[in-house]
Amino acid sequence: MNIKNLLLGVITDKELLNYYNATITYENTPKSVRGCVFNYDGVYFIMINKNLSYYKRKKTLLHELAHIELNQLCQKDKDLFAFYIDKYEDEASEYLKNIEKEICDLEKR
């Protein structure tokens, strides 16, 4: 189970969340914060800005799931994680772009 399966319609977002032991909450956050994800006691908590449009909420959810799939939250040195936060954000965005490209290539066949 992964984001690619979700985007292809093979699984639902609920199934993927269950697979990752993740939950979503929608909160009032500053405009500059679309979402975030953290792990606590083996559960992934995804927080999404509730003031975003439906489309932006879906994109944000995919981005936060990418962090989980890339195993970026399992860093032993939390200070080092903070130092590389921009790198992890870029990696998650690039990961999603690659998945979307793969799907577009499949649809062209």
Image: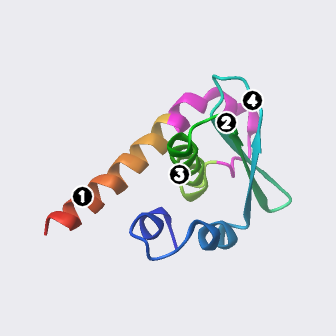
At label 2, which amino acid type do we have? Phe
Distance between mark 4 and mark 3 Cα atoms: 18 Å
Residue 62 has which mark? Answer: 3
Name the outermost residue toward the right. 41
Residues tagged 1 and 2 counted as in contact (Cβ below 8 A)? no
Residue under the point 59% across and 31% down: 84
Q: Amino acid at mark 1?
A: Cys
Q: Which mark is residue 104?
A: 1
* Residue highlighted by disc 4: 29
Q: Position of residue 1 (x, y in %)?
A: 52, 74
Q: Residue 92: horizontal and vertical position, in percent?
A: 49, 44
**18 is within the stretch colored magenta:** no
Label 4 with label 2: CB-CB less than 8 Å:
no
Query: What segment carries the magenta color?
Result: 73-89
Instruction: Residue 81: give its label.
Output: 2
Mark 4 crowdedness (10 Å alpha carbons): few <14, some 14-19, many ≥20 = some
Label 3 SS: helix
